[in-house]
Image: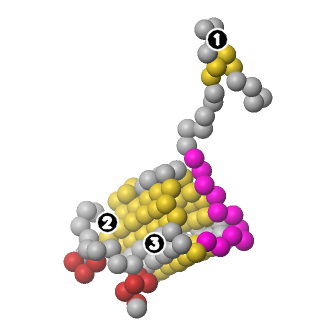
Amino acid sequence: MFNNKSNSKGDSKTMLPTSTVNIIGSGTTIQGDIVCEGDIRIDGQVNGLVSTKAKIVVGPEGDIIGDLVCQSADILGKVTGIIRVEELLFLKGNALVKGDVYTAHFEMEPSAKFNGRCYMGDEMPENNKHGKSVLQEAE
């Protein structure tokens, strides 16, 4: 099952995963920023920025206090902060988002809740060009 296969020339061939999935499990709390290249699923609690060039999934028990920056996102849990998504932001199930959203495409199930402003397109509002988070604005 884990053996390397050799081709006819005698070279060994190792199977490597094509993408990395990072998981923050239920019961885990992280104080600080998370920056990664691959997909990330958060079922625990994060207090800080979560940033990736891929997809973020916030599970039903996930709770993020801080900003999200990613290519696409599925949110089923709670996010308090600014969300910046290059492609599709999808709020599913009992998702609760408190904060502004910047995205190209936005989809939301009827059971999800969203309290904030939604900006779709390339332009940011004049008073938030420096990317201040909701938490910073409240201070």
Q: Quadrant of residue 95?
A: bottom right
The residue wearing badge 2 is 120
Mark 3, Cα crowd under 10 Å, few <14 / some 14-19 / many 20+, is many
Mark 1, Cα crowd under 10 Å, few <14 / some 14-19 / many 20+, is few
Q: Residue 67, position in %: x, y?
A: 45, 72
Q: Quadrant of residue 115?
A: bottom left
| Residue pictured at 50% horizontal, 66% vertical | 50
Q: Is residue 60 visible?
A: no
Q: Is residue 135 left or right of residue 129?
A: right
The residue wearing badge 3 is 67
Front label number (3 vs 2): 3
Secondary element at image label 2: strand
Above or below, 130 against 138 in this view is above
Front label number (2 vs 1): 1
Name the residue nearer the viewer: 60 or 37. Answer: 37
Front label number (1 vs 3): 1
The residue wearing badge 1 is 10
Contact between labelled residues 2 and 3, with CB atoms less than 8 Å apart: no
Q: What span is in magenta?
A: 20-30
